[in-house]
Structures are given as C-alpha cells and as structure tokens.
Image (cartoon, grey):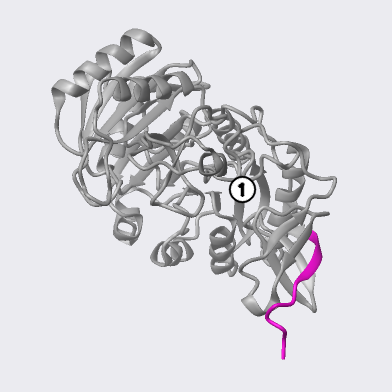
Amino acid sequence: MQNSEEIIECKVVDIDEKGRGICIWKGKHIRVEGALPGDIAQFQPGRGFRKAKTLKRGNYAIKPSCVHFGICGGCSWQHVPYVQQVWHKERMLARILDKVLTSKSKVYPILPATRIYYYRNKLEFTFSHTRWLSRNDIDSEDRVIDRRALGFFVRKRFDRVVDINSCHLQESNDIRNEIKKYALTYDVPFYSSQTRTGILRNVLIRSNVSEQFMVVLIFAVYDKQLAMKMGEHICKKFPQIVSFQLIVNDSLNDSYSQYPAETLFGSQYIVEHCDHITIRIYPQSFYQTNSYQAMHLYRLIASWLKERVVTCVYDLYCGAGSIGLYILNDSNQVIGIESVSMAVQAAWENARDISAKNISFFVGKVEDILDLDFATTHGFPDAVILDPPRAGVHDRTIDFLKKIRPAYIYYVSCNPISFARNVQQLSEYYEIRQLRAVDMFPHTPHIEVVAELCRLNV
C-alpha cells in the first residue's frame, strides 16, 4: 500500500499539449503546472498528484517580464525563453498530428511571432469590489482597505480579480488605468457578482495596427449620463480613441455578445488594415486577436491557393469575411457562411469598402445551411476554407464535405486536437499536403495551425 505521506521528487523531462511540465515516475506521466524541463518537481502519489508543484528551477527558466505572472490567468509561459517556446510548440504539434500526417505531408517550420509583447488587438478587463490579495498584501502590517480592482481573473478562478497595473499584451495600460482612476475618483460603484449590485462590470479595449483604439464600457444598469461623462473625460485625454461605446449587461454572466452597443463618441467600429483589404471591427466582431500574425496567416493561405486553379471557394465560419476577402480575385467566386448576423452585416460592409465583386455571405449555422440544394444553387466549390471555433467542424459539415469532395480544403485551427480529429474523419478522401503553425499567442502554449488538405486523386 502506498504511503500517502510519501514525498516524491522527480525531474521534469518534457511539456505536454497544455503547457504543463511532465515527470515520468514508475511509467506514469505526472503533469505539473508551470514546470519546465530541467526543473525538479515534488508530489505525493497518494494524493492523486493533484498537488504536484515545482520544487526547484533548472537553468531553463528566465525572469518573467510581468509583475503579475503566476497569478493572472494569462501569459503562462513568460518564464520560457521565446526560442524555446517555439521549439516546444513544434514538438507538441508533432505529437498531436502524428497519426494524420502522411509521406506526402510537407510540414514547414513554425512561423514565429514578429512581436512577442503588445501583440493583442482585443482585451477584456473585469471590475471587482473584492480584488485578489497578494501574499505581500496579506503579510503586510498595513490593512488593505480599498479592494476595488480592474483587471483579469486569477488563474483558474472566476470569483477573484487581479488588479492589473501594467499588462504586456496590449498598448492600452494608460487608458485602462485612467478609467479606473476616474471610477475611484468619482466613487462609481464596481459590480459585485455575489450581490448583483454596482454599475461597472467590464471594459473592452480593441486596437488596430494604426494604434487607434475602441473602448467599450459594459454597465450592469443603463446610465447614459455617467457613461457620457466617463467617455468625454477618457476621449479628451486619449485622442487615439476613435470609438467609445456602451453596452448594458444585466444578466448573471459576463457574456455581452448578445447585447447591442450604443456609440457615445466617434465611430461604431474600428478599421483594421490587412495588406490590400480593410476590416470593420465592431464591439462583438470576431477577428484574429493578433493582427500582425493574421497578415502572415492570410498571406500563407493566399500563396497556397495561387498554386491551384479554383473558381468557387466556400469560406465557412467566415466571421466578418476577412479570409474570403483576402483571397478573392477576378477569377474566383467566394461564398461565406457565418452564424452571427452582426458579423455577416460587417462582412457585407467590408466587401463594399473595397468594392469587392463575386463574393456573397449567408447567415446561419454552417451545418444547417450546407446541403446539396445549396451547392446546386450557388455552385459546387473547388476549395473550402474552414476556420471553426475550438470545438472544430460539426459532423454534419464533415459529412457534406465527404459527399461533394472539393479538390482542396484550407483549414485554420486554434485547437490542433480538434483539427487532428477532423482530419482523421476526412482521411478516406483527403490528406494533408502542406501545414504550418503560426505563433499567434507568444508566452502561452496555444498554437494556430494552417493546413492544405488535398483530395487523394488530385
């Protein structure tokens, strides 16, 4: 019988697909949050390894740039040198895709990020009246009186918020801190999810490569006068804010995508420039959160498509139509399908902004719209672009693709595991010909994959 008090020390030898360190003990893989190869981890076998922790750092780790590292829920790999982050992502991807790659699969090296800090174009911050207390706060002889916070949730907790002073993800620190300063100065009530009282719930900040900003306040109750006063102050102080909006969310959760936004100052949207196209981005719009890497991703798909002869392209899960518009030319037709009506409205606007022809968009779930009647009416595709959510492509859509068998499928995935599953489902008729990972998320274990699947007889 295993001694439940036994303490085991074991060397970390690898990193798994979720970024956790791996120890091997008696043939078992012990996963340790935050651990790196070369570290010494400690755990108790009798406790199901849930308490495994890093005991001693090896020579691998570096000092994180952010003072909130380890508490905040983001940037879990800031202590990993960037060149090693890229190397580990390639290894993780190779393990995940081992069973779906063939002898004809050309796998290119991962495309590293051009910017490893301040690369995100969208951040959401949460107001809280009971901020997370650090160990220094707890140990201090001074009593913490004001616990109001504006920041991110504590890692793996959704009831406490880390008060963020400086974040390395987006060049919006001054804007966020001024919003908090205004709220504290004028004693604007921070929202409490426990008592459902207060006004300030969240703030969304979006930016573009031109260093313009959209700020969206999310209130728990409608108070336009307050929002106008805050907006007037913030916009005057930061002229780079081109859009200031208000959303009211009186629900039990923080999801605001179903609620309309009211424009208080500036435009209803912010414009992103991506080579030859422009994209209108509204508060609820989906767009790749790393604008700099999105350009490389779109260029990659376009370069692969140029090698093929295609006349009709389906852009599935198209969002605001950015990929379809990017690869559109005079010799092809693009048909986009997206379930979010506001995104489709933006897609039509984006098409008009660049005078795009031969492109159309449809609202609805991909698996509900696609059938043989649709293809007969609008044309059978030579190529299909897939950019699904993390869960992957719906089984009905997979079945449809197996029926019509377009010559080429271009798959963009933020989840290599669901991507591998979908490729396996299509393996009777398709194989991966080209694949490349694009590092959209430095300092995290997340991987974006772009692949060209070719029909077996092509």
- Please tell me which residue is depicted at 51% across the width and 22% down the height of the picture: 171
Q: Which image quadrant: the C terminus?
A: bottom right
Q: Is residue 334 visible?
A: yes
Task: Classify residue 69 as left or right of residue 402.
Answer: right
Q: Residue 308: horizontal and vertical position, in percent? A: 60, 42
- Please tell me which residue is depicted at 23% across the width and 52% down the height of the picture: 252
Q: Which residues are magenta?
A: 1-13
Q: Is residue 310 above or below residue 183?
A: below
Pick the front one: 259 or 171: 171
Pick the front one: 197 or 254: 197
Q: Is residue 393 above or below residue 215?
A: below
**Number of numbered discs visible in the structure rendering:** 1
The residue type indicated by label 1 comes to Ile
Q: Which image quadrant: the N terminus?
A: bottom right
Task: Classify residue 382 as left or right of residue 299.
Answer: left
Task: Classify residue 455 as left or right of residue 262.
Answer: right
Residue 380 highlighted magenta (yes or no): no
SS at circle 1: loop
Q: Residue 436: horizontal and vertical position, in percent? A: 67, 45
Q: Residue 398: horizontal and vertical position, in percent? A: 45, 64
- The answer to which quarter of the image holds residue 225 is top left
Residues packed near mark 1 inside 10 Å, few (<14), some (14 to 19) or many (20 plus): many
Q: Residue 115: horizontal and vertical position, in percent? A: 64, 27
Residue 3 highlighted magenta (yes or no): yes
Q: Is residue 355 visible?
A: no
Residue picked out by circle 1:
447
Q: Is residue 8 above or below residue 436?
A: below
